[in-house]
Image (cartoon, rainbow, N blue to C red):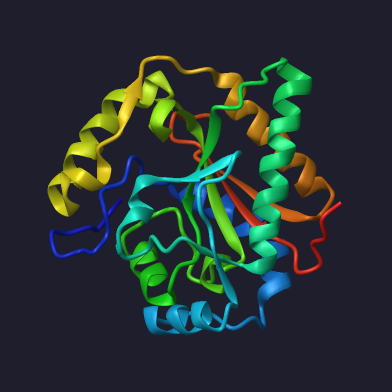
Amino acid sequence: MSKQTSKSPLLPSLASPTEFELAVMDRALYRERQWYQDAARFQTKKDIKSAIKKRELILVEASKDLKPIARFNASLDGYTPYLTRNAYRASKAFGSLWRMVLAREYNIKDPSLRLAITSMVRTQKYQNILVENGRFAAADSTHCTGNAFDVDISGYYSIQSKNQAISHVDPRRRAASAKIGQLIAQKVGEPLLHQAQSDHYDHRITEAALLAAEVLHEEEAINLIHEFKDTPNACLHIAVSPDFKMS
């Protein structure tokens, strides 16, 4: 389904959505479309840089609960580690709730664990390229307003001594992930994407993330879209409500 060519600025992807998955996504976007139908959209990188300068977008760094993936460490199209202030607060609340669910439901209290943020603000120009190349994307994505972020629920990190991040991914994804990693390394450089990987994967850690997001969705604090559901490439698209408030 992908139309990607060697001239495409997109990085290789682990999976492509089916027509059915795209149709389900389109229906699931109703809530956030209502929220942001009149919101300004970042058309270009210049628009994003201007918003950063005005402090309308907040830098998202690794925290005790969440960690942006390695691609945010370089100036790559589509990987700008910024969110609106409201979305930034929502990401913090989501991370804290995930940690709480992890402890209460599964009795896991490991402070080294981190969820992986895979996407934040995007330009409309980049979003259009995603759509044209058959990615899991909508032309009117909330990402282009800075009010949405994606979280991997087929993988996570653990932070070891000297702040080394160890990647843990669904075993079903491991071979494909390694192959994609090699392709990306060839395109953008090995130093950017070199990451130690563990053979251990605990599905309860990412299940807790889904439970936490579902709670926030039911409270209408966010809009949640479960992308690539029931596959080893599953992730959560989370768009914050304009009326979001920390509880």
Comparing 146 with 8, the one in front is: 146
Q: How many marks?
A: 0
Residue 229 in sight: no
User: Residue visible at 46% across and 78% down?
Assistant: 48
Q: For residue 163, what is the image quadrant?
A: top left
Q: x%, y% of residue 13?
A: 31, 46
Q: x%, y% of residue 165?
A: 40, 33
Relative to 158, residue 151 above or below: below
Q: As drawn, is 165 to the left or to the right of 226?
A: left
Relative to 66, residue 54 above or below: below
Relative to 196, residue 9 above or below: below
Residue farthest along the front direction in this orientation? 162
User: Residue visible at 44% across and 53% down?
Assistant: 136
Q: As drawn, is 245 to the left or to the right of 142?
A: right
Q: x%, y% of residue 68?
A: 46, 48
Residue 200 in sight: yes
Q: For residue 170, what is the image quadrant?
A: top left
User: Residue visible at 46% across and 60% down?
Assistant: 81
Relative to 148, residue 233 above or below: above
User: Residue visible at 79% across and 22% down?
Assistant: 104
Q: x%, y% of residue 202?
A: 53, 17
